[in-house]
Amino acid sequence: MKICIFIFILIVTAFSGCTTTHFKNSGTLPILTGVGPSFEGRSEVEIQKDFFLWGFLPETHTIWVDHVVAKMGFESGANIEIEEQSRWKNTIFSILSLGMYLPKSYKISVQGLKAKNEK
């Protein structure tokens, strides 16, 4: 019975936490809500943010979407999709550390306008 309670606490710890990630635009690149005719390709990138102490540290993470778009080689981005990824590796790390380490993975997909120097 005690082992069942311990396993239950481990599972609850792994899937709970107060993690907060903000996705913002700093205004350095134009981010559009629609897609123009000159937008060529679609790219995606995965980003991992690490939280500690059941998600209490740091209080929040901020991902600057326009900086991510620029790193992809675009001068403008549109039709942005952000998805939190469920990774077994992240769950295992959370369980083994008893919630002291909580990695969160995100996939950002962007349709963009290639920078002039990359055409």
Image (tube, grey):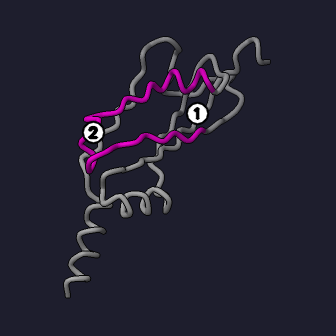
Residue at image coords 67%, 22%: 73
- Estimate the x, y position of residue 95 in percent, counting from the top left: 36, 63
In the image, 85 versus 110, the foreground residue is 85
Q: Is residue 21 above or below residue 105?
A: above
Q: Which residue is mark 1?
A: 110
Where disc 1 sits, the SS reads strand
Q: Is residue 49 above or below residue 119?
A: below
* Quadrant in the rendering for residue 23: top left
- Viewed as shown, does residue 69 lie left or right of 8? right
In the image, 112 versus 20, the foreground residue is 20
Residue at image coords 42%, 21%: 25
Quarter of the image with the N terminus is bottom left
- The stretch drawn in magenta includes residue 107: no
Q: Amino acid at mark 2?
A: Leu
Estimate how packed mark 1 is, as few (under 14), some (14 to 19) or many (20 or more) residues with alpha carbons within 10 Å: many
- Estimate the x, y position of residue 114 in percent, counting from the top left: 70, 21
Q: Which residues are magenta?
A: 45-71
In the image, 66 versus 104, the foreground residue is 104
Q: Is residue 86 above or below residue 34?
A: below
Q: Which residue is mark 2?
A: 57
Residue at image coords 37%, 29%: 62
Where disc 2 sits, the SS reads loop
Quarter of the image with the C terminus is top right
- Estimate the x, y position of residue 45 in percent, counting from the top left: 59, 38
View extreme (bottom): residue: 1
